[in-house]
Image (spheres, rainbow, N blue to C red):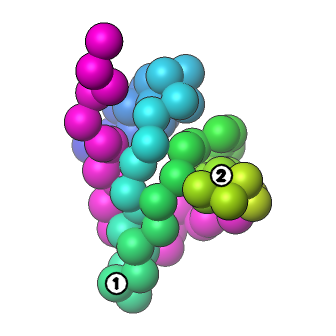
Amino acid sequence: MDESSQQHFIDDLIAAKTVCSVFLINGIRLVGILKRQDSRSIILESRDYTDQLLYKQAISTISPSAPPEH
């Protein structure tokens, strides 16, 4: 995935306020809503409303939750 596709994918998740699982390269799983991004980092808001700064180089996978029911 090139950088442009990555940016668009994350921007879509931010806009939709989708709950995501973020897996780090060390195996840790974080769950929350992506709030902002720049070229090197992402802000993740966890379920207890605390923000975490994640460096993109430390992220293995971002997995969006299922779409909400209407």
Q: Residue at x 62, y 65 (%)?
A: 54
Magenta-tinted stretch: 52-70
Across and down, in percent, residue 47 comes to 59, 56
Residue 5 can be seen, yes or no:
yes
Across and down, in percent, residue 37 comes to 64, 42
Across and down, in percent, residue 43 comes to 67, 52
Marks 1 and 2, how far apart at CA = 19 Å
Q: Amino acid at mark 2?
A: Glu
- Magenta-colored stretch includes residue 57: yes
- In this view, the residue in front, 62 or 67, is 67
Q: Quadrant of residue 18?
A: top left
Q: Residue at x 39, y 87 (%)?
A: 26
Image check: 49 left or right of 55? right
Q: Which mark is residue 27?
A: 1
What element does badge 1 sit on?
loop
Q: Which mark is residue 45?
A: 2
